[in-house]
Amino acid sequence: MWKMWLLFDPRRVLVLLTVFLFSLAVLIHFILLSTERYNWLEQQASLSDGNAHIEMLLPNGSSALV
């Protein structure tokens, strides 16, 4: 395993890995923001209109609106 680092510069590999993971995270977040279900920015706007409810799961298995 240590011979692999003789072929590749560790600093360059770590920089490329960091850039790749950051761009992957940004891509995933933009994909989620483009969907209706997982767009947390639009959900904040719809929750502020007063029609929001929270469903609470009770220990006996039933649910109640809060």
Image (cartoon, rainbow, N blue to C red):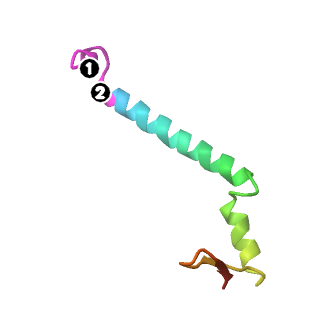
Give the magenta-colored segment's residue range: 1-11
Q: Residue type at mark 1: give it.
A: Trp
Q: Residues within 10 Å of mark 1 (few under 14, many from 20)?
A: few
- Count of number-bearing discs: 2
Q: Which mark is residue 10?
A: 2
Residue 6 position in % (x across, y down): 24, 15
Q: Is residue 61 left or right of residue 37?
A: left
Give the residue number, with chain letter if any, for mark 1: 5
Q: CA distance from mark 1 to mark 2?
A: 6 Å
Residue 39 position in % (x across, y down): 70, 59
- Is residue 45 within the magenta segment? no
Task: State the residue at coordinates (24%, 19%).
Answer: 1
Image quarter in which the C terminus is found: bottom right
Q: Residues within 10 Å of mark 2 (few under 14, many from 20)?
A: few
Task: State the residue at coordinates (60%, 45%).
Answer: 28
In the image, 37 versus 22, the foreground residue is 37
